[in-house]
Image (cartoon, rainbow, N blue to C red):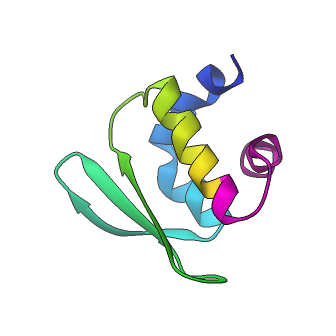
Amino acid sequence: MLFETYSQCFCKGVGKITWKIGYEVSRQKGSHIRLTCNSPKVHHITIPNHDPIKVGTLAAILSDIAAFRNQGKESLISEIFG
């Protein structure tokens, strides 16, 4: 599956990857990180700080971000990972 390739990469480079699309780390509590995007409106996502992130969890995170941006998931993956 496509997401298996990216799950470990996403966890290790979460700050760098999410920065590319406008998210910043707003806080961390325990093993979870809260990311916030302020453009065009405020959007929060909470991700686990696990290595690697499970495939289903990664798919849900990407779906949430894609829905917020009115963008397809495949298009978002291409934008993030090149």
Over which residues does the magenta segment extend?
Answer: 66-82
* Rendered view: 13 above or below 6: below
- Numbered label tally: 0
**What is the x, y in percent for residue 11?**
46, 39
Q: Is residue 52 left or right of residue 33?
A: right
**Quadrant, the C terminus:** top right
Task: Decide which of 38, 8 is in the foreground and name it.
Answer: 38
Residue displayed at 58% across by 35% down: 59
Comparing 54 with 70, the one in front is 70
Q: Residue at x 44, y 26 (%)?
A: 54
Instruction: State the residue at coordinates (53%, 46%).
Output: 61
Q: Is 78 colored magenta in this rendering?
A: yes
| Residue 76 left/right relative to 59 | right
Residue 42: x and y in percent read 52, 80
Query: Which residue is depicted at the point 54% across and 30% down?
Result: 7
Measured as percent of width and height from the top left, residue 40 is found at 67, 83
